[in-house]
């Protein structure tokens, strides 16, 4: 009974007392959060340090700590019977197909789970590294992926989850057996572990773990003055729409790039503030940052136990719903996790019947200068939505960086003790820094300024709790005030412009492709809703996606 009461409280999301903020006021056009474009009169957040920088010249492109041969040696013998002719035969049946279409093709005998897995592996090997089109999006391959696919063909039945037999790439901060979980850092190159909770859930429903995707090292909370998509282990991930010109977004850079380039049926990323929304929108993909606690974080290399969450990055909204449906669920090892009363199938049920009729969305007035955003709003109106132009609340995110500092200072040792390989003796941020100094050119070519900030931050637990309380209240008020005033169902943003506020409010957000600017750079329309309203986000995004058909695959990888 106490757990039911707790659940009801969670679902109702009883609001703690809101206090008047003396914090910084939001203005326009200065970056706030990783890749965001909010601004403040005076930046007391520290978020400029983790904002995406525009890089076109890189200190490192190909990894100095990992070769293509090292990735493929174990799997190459199992791919010998898959030819270029096989690849060409299957290409039109697999590229840009959503998961239901892939499953239908398999049901009709057009190919098998084994062939699907081999197709993606062949394609990754063909394009991803050490060639003119290289994207450096994949950092390791599960040596058992093909064997598992063969087993899926033998074991399949009519009563399976839609994720069954689908090859999935994981961001390389998510533990998965058979591959090291490195977070992109050489210090963790031998971090072979058991499966994370969400990986266990994927496998229990029959998904195939294809491999690991590159990421911004330590989830972009490491160097401070470096490009997104870079890690010492994985090298520099590049955007398939214009490599070395368009930013990949981060920190789930490889996950966003790989799914956009059709290297897997779907990918998983993780987000603290913008790290799913950013690479999804930058690579014309669908990215969902769930309500914190809906998806387990156990076995994922952390930044912040307060804000971290995993989530799906896919090419379509239906695929996103399928992956979320496969990974959500209570994890008693995760202090933010909670009991859920809905069953598997909840997020995909009746998605095709969704409607926007009568739905009210808030559109920040300053974003109306973006022509793609205006065009997206028109599409929503044509589907029956009401759009209310709003002024944003003048609230800031003070000490955001210090929240991350103080959380990671305690959360990383906790991960190392509970979930990392026991043979690795490094435990703290200071330990990792000392390791990097052994070969700074190869291990930290852009420095490790953010790690230095973590180690130097002496804030105590009481200070951390005050930061969390203030940020949480500010984040909720930022959305709740206009939602209440205008009776809004949701909030419309671009890319991850409002990721910081959604993060501290613990509200879910979903970005979906809305087109390309005059330079050809992808942008995403981002829906934000209140706690545990992921199903609504998926419905809204699905209707918009089906009406707009905005995604176009990167041309050089077809």
Image (cartoon, rainbow, N blue to C red):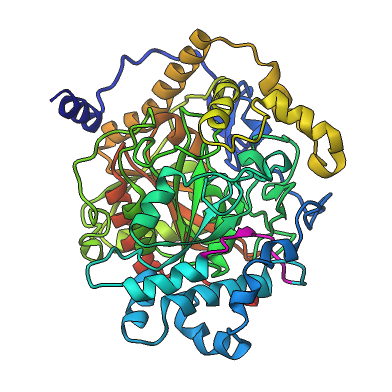
Residue 506 position (above or below residue 528): above
How many badges with numbers are in the image?
A: 0
Quadrant housing the N terminus = top left
Q: Is residue 294 above or below residue 380?
A: above
Nearer to us in this view, 205 or 120: 205
Q: Does residue 125 appear to the left or right of 350 in the view shown?
A: right
Whether 171 is drawn above or below 546: the answer is above
Which residue is at a point 55% across and 48% down the rendered structure image?
278
User: Where is residue 349 shown, x and y percent of the image?
Assistant: 21, 60
Which secondary structure is most common in the magenta stretch? loop
Query: x, y percentage for residue 377?
Result: 39, 56
Q: Quadrant of residue 8?
A: top left
Residue 408 in the image: state x and y as whole percent. Answer: 58, 26
65 or 419, nearer to the observer: 419
Left-right relation of 383 to 145: left
Quarter where residue 104 is shown: bottom left
Please state the extent of the stretch shown in magenta in the rendering.
133-144
Say whether residue 495 is visible. no
| Residue farthest to the left, as pictured | 1
């Amino acid at each position: 009974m106490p757990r039911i009461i707790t659940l009801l409280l969670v679902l109702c999301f009883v609001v703690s007392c809101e206090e008047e903020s003396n914090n910084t006021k939001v203005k326009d056009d200065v970056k706030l959060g990783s890749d965001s474009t909010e601004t403040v009169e005076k930046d007391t957040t520290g978020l400029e340090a983790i904002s995406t920088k525009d890089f076109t010249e890189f200190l490192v492109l190909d990894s100095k700590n990992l070769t293509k041969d090292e990735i493929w040696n174990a799997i190459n013998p199992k791919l010998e019977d898959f030819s270029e002719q096989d690849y060409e035969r299957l290409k039109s049946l697999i590229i840009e197909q959503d998961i239901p279409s892939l499953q239908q093709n398999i049901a009709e005998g057009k190919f098998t789970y084994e062939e699907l897995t081999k197709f993606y592996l062949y394609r990754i090997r063909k394009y991803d590294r050490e060639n003119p089109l290289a994207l450096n999006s994949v950092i390791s391959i599960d040596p058992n992926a093909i064997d598992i696919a063969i087993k899926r063909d033998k074991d399949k039945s009519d009563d399976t989850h839609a994720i069954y037999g689908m090859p999935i790439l994981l961001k390389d901060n998510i533990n998965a057996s058979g591959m090291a979980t490195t977070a992109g850092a050489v210090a963790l190159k031998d971090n072979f572990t058991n499966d994370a909770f969400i990986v266990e859930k994927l496998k229990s429903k029959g998904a195939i773990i294809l491999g690991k995707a590159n990421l911004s090292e330590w989830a972009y909370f490491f160097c401070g003055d470096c490009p997104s998509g870079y890690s010492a282990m994985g090298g520099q991930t590049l955007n398939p729409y214009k490599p070395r010109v368009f930013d990949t977004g981060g920190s789930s850079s490889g996950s966003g790039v790989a799914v956009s380039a059709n290297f897997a049926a779907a990918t998983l990323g993780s987000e603290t503030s913008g790290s799913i929304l950013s690479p999804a929108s930058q690579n014309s993909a669908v990215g969902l940052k769930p309500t914190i606690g809906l998806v387990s974080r156990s076995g994922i290399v952390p930044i912040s136990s307060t804000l971290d969450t995993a989530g799906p990055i896919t090419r379509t909204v239906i695929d996103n719903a399928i992956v979320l449906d496969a990974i959500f669920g209570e994890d008693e090892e995760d202090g933010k996790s909670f009991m859920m009363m809905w069953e598997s199938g909840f997020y995909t049920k009746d998605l095709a019947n969704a409607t926007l009729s009568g739905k009210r969305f808030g559109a920040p007035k300053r974003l109306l200068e973006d022509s793609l955003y205006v065009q997206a709003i028109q599409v929503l109106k044509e589907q029956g939505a009401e759009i209310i132009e709003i002024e944003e609340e003048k609230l800031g995110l003070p000490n955001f960086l210090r929240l991350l500092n103080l959380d990671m200072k305690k959360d990383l040792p906790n991960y190392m003790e509970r979930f990392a390989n026991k043979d690795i003796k490094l435990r703290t941020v200071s330990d990792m820094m000392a390791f990097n100094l052994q070969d700074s050119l190869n291990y930290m070519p852009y420095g490790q300024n953010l790690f230095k900030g973590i180690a130097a931050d002496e804030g105590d637990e009481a200070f951390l709790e005050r930061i969390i309380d203030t940020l949480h209240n500010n984040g909720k008020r930022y959305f709740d005030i206009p939602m209440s005033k205008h009776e809004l169902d949701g909030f419309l943003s671009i890319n991850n412009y409002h990721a910081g506020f959604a993060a501290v409010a613990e509200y879910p957000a979903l970005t979906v492709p809305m087109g390309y600017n005059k330079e050809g750079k992808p942008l995403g329309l981002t829906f934000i809703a209140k706690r545990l309203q992921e199903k609504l986000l998926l419905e809204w995004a699905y209707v918009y996606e089906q009406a707009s058909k905005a995604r176009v695959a990167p041309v050089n990888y077809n």
